[in-house]
Image (spheres, grey):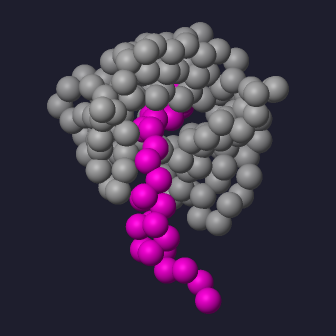
Amino acid sequence: MTLPPHEFRQTLGRFASGVTVITAAADGERRGMTANAFVSVSLVPPLILVSVDKRASMHAVLESAERFGVSVLSAAQRPLSDHFAGRPQPAEVPWFDHEGLPLIAGAVAQLVCRKHSAVDAGDHTLFLGEVDYSRYTDDDPLIYFRGQYHELG
């Protein structure tokens, strides 16, 4: 018996997660996609994983990219999450580049990764990245739980 996708999604929605924007450069343009399927994999070497739907335009970008970025959004950056989730907002994106790789300014944390490997996983691909650069702040993160945004405290 297979668990229906809706039931699986509702169940996993009970896991609170941070909100990230995965970024890369493609054809001279900055590209981004909201993702909460992000996880630390290894400390030595420093590896992270992002899970991307094969139908997402970011999937093709990450398949061809050698590097990608991850920006962990702050509680104040909810409009950016919506923007990169396909609900464009009128505000300008606060891009900044680190050695040619686009990241989101004002994020709680930023990581620059070299693509380590890609693993086929059903309707998604798991992209593993080896972290070359990171920075962080002590600002509060944006939280996603039961299909809604939340803030700490």
The C terminus: image quadrant: top left
Q: Is 22 contained in the magenta span?
A: yes
Residue at left offset 58%, top offset 22%: 111
Query: In screen coordinates, is 62 left or right of 11?
Result: right
Residue 134 is situated, as x and y percent measured from the top left of the image, at 60, 16
Residue 108 is situated, as x and y percent measured from the top left of the image, at 43, 21
Identify the residue at the far front of this view. 153
Identify the residue at the far right of this view. 44
Query: In screen coordinates, is 36 left or right of 124?
Result: left
89 shown above or below 122: above
| Residue 138 visible to the viewer | yes
Provide the residue span drawn in magenta: 1-26
Residue at left offset 49%, top offset 70%: 8
Identify the residue at the far bottom of this view. 1
29 shown above or below 41: above
Quarter location, residue 1: bottom right
Residue 14 is situated, as x and y percent measured from the top left of the image, at 43, 58
123 shown above or below 143: below
From the viewer's side, name the closer residue of 65 and 35. 35
40 shown above or below 148: above
Residue at left offset 55%, top offset 13%: 135
